[in-house]
Image (spheres, rainbow, N blue to C red):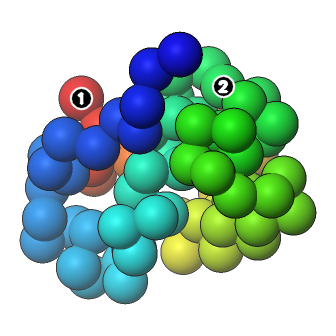
Amino acid sequence: MAGPVQPPPGNPAAVASLGLTPREVEVLQLLAAGQANKEMARTMGVSPNTVKTHLARLFEKLGASSRTEAIARARVLGILG
């Protein structure tokens, strides 16, 4: 099983302006890689509830209402490749 996916974010200015934490960026990367909440929890070594909390904060910060929308917004902002 692969370890955390954590190359530097593609757009540090956008990450900083949105106030994304390194863990939120990691969740976003795993989300874009197609991982389900339980997979993310195993990869990150946290509980599924912690993943849900990170996702809720990501959605709020990105102004997204779904996983797909969050990924799309992150790509537009250059946070994801």
* Dot 2 and dot 1 residues touching (CB under 8 Å): no
The image quadrant where one finds the C terminus is top left
Which three-letter amino acid code belongs to the residue tagged 1? Gly
Q: Nearer the viewer, residue 22 or 19?
A: 22
Q: Residue at x 20, y 51 (%)?
A: 9
Residue 51 is situated, as x and y percent measured from the top left of the image, at 73, 57
| Residue that sits furthest to the right in the current view | 49
Q: Which residue is drawn at 87% across and 63% down?
A: 49
| Residue 59 image point, x, y percent | 66, 63
Mark 1 residue crowding within 10 angstroms, few (<14) / some (14–19) / many (20+)? few
Q: Quadrant of residue 60?
A: bottom right
Residue 25 appears in view: yes
Q: Which amino acid does label 2 sit on?
A: Gln
Left/right placement of residue 2 relative to residue 17 reads: right
Q: Which residue is drawn at 78% across and 40% down?
A: 37
Instruction: Between label 2 and label 1, give the one nearer the viewer.
Output: 2
For this rendering, which residue is in front, 51 or 20? 51
Disc 2 or 1, which lies upstream in sequence? Answer: 2
Q: Is residue 72 visible?
A: no
Q: In which quarter of the image is residue 75?
A: top left
The numbered mark at residue 35 is: 2
Is residue 36 shown above or below 44? Answer: above
Callout 1: SS: loop
Side (left or right) of 30 relative to 15: right
Residue annotated with mark 1? 81
Residue 46 location, quadrant: bottom right
Residue 66, position in %: x, y? 76, 45
| Label 2 CA crowd tier, 10 Å (few <14, some 14–19, many 20+) | some
